[in-house]
Amino acid sequence: MSLLNDLINLDLSETTEKTIVEYIWIGGSGMDLRSKARTLPGPVTDPSQLPKWNYDGSSTGQAPGEDSEVILYPQAIFPDPFRRGNHILVMCDTYTPAGEPIPTNKRYNAAKTFSHPDVVDEEPWYGIEQEYTLLQKDVKWPLGWPVGGFPGPQGPYYCAIGADKAFGREIVDAHYKACLYAGINISGINGEVMPGQWEYQVGPSVGISAGDQVWVSRYILERIAEIAGVVVSFDPKPIPGDWNGAGAHTNYSTKSMREEGGFEVIKAAIDKLGLKHKEHIAAYGEGNERRLTGRHETANIDTFLWGVANRGASIRVGRDTEKAGKGYFEDRRPASNMDPYAVTSMIAETTILWKP
């Protein structure tokens, strides 16, 4: 095994300038990340330097067998924490051979929203709190839980330490450092309320880069869990009953919200989000109705309400924002399995571009 590890960690820069590029894309379920690698003759510093590529869309649920080719367009590059050196990860979106975005390509419309002059002027910032659950591979039961049984009730596990309360920290910390290596603006981690559940935060990120960074952070997490023999679940309610679900709370501000008088802009934006509550819920993740019950720090899925420091609200405004009269707010409705391209662009569309 030591020889295998030596080979995995070979520094290719000693013998060649060739670069390994891992092309990453989203499969047909909207959550299944896929990737494959190719060798290029030298280092790459910009997505425009990368060739388009293709894959068999009939094997990912994205194209029929008789016309299966889907084209990958490189969009954002990140240093590869697994191969290191000049090797890179590249986040791609997906198109037909004729150049039309395929239905699962949420990035295409998000990029259009974020390139709108009114949105560009407002410099939308996002901080996304990605929750997830680590599962034992063979039984699909949370890490640290007795097989077929349950741990003690919630309470001791949130931000906890100790072998009987914190399960999977080595995966979490490896992911934290790997994301920083990759240039992802991961701003923190913590253990969550349900044992075996964790959270990391990505941001502040501007516009389309928020979606790119969250997707690549998920890819890195899945790869690290693969090495550890553990399964990552983004299910919004992995365990039924009196256990917290998993969300992707989305913190948001615009330039106008961050300036003097911004609190009034925040309230106007929240009013607009309330008017489009049903449309947002429909785009905020599959199975979210199992999580948004009005219990376990959520608002009921059919109700829109906001409040200061209220974790049972749809939208939470922080005490610091209220005190300063400017800042940001938190949309607590998105599920852990949401598409960050869809959620971030929809919030910008509703709060900046929509004129009710």
Image: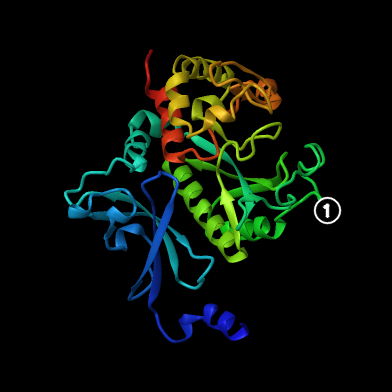
**On the image, which quarter does residue 65 sit in?**
bottom left
Q: Which residue is drawn at the image coordinates 65% and 59% (left, top)?
A: 171
According to the picture, the residue beneath numbered tag 1 turns out to be: 162
Q: Position of residue 43 (x, y in %)?
A: 39, 71
**Element type at mark 1:** loop
Q: In the visual, does 74 lie left or right of 309?
A: left
Quarter of the image for the N terminus: give it: bottom right
The one of 161 and 253 positioned closer to us in this rendering = 161
Q: Which residue is drawn at the image coordinates 44% and 65% (left, top)?
A: 88
Q: Position of residue 325 (x, y in %)?
A: 63, 20
Q: Position of residue 140 (x, y in %)?
A: 61, 51
Vertical side of 20 occupied by 297: above or below = above
**Can residue 72 be seen from the camera position used here?**
no
Which amino acid, by three-letter code, is at mark 1? Gly
Vertical side of 153 occupied by 145: above or below = below
The one of 351 and 104 positioned closer to us in this rendering = 104
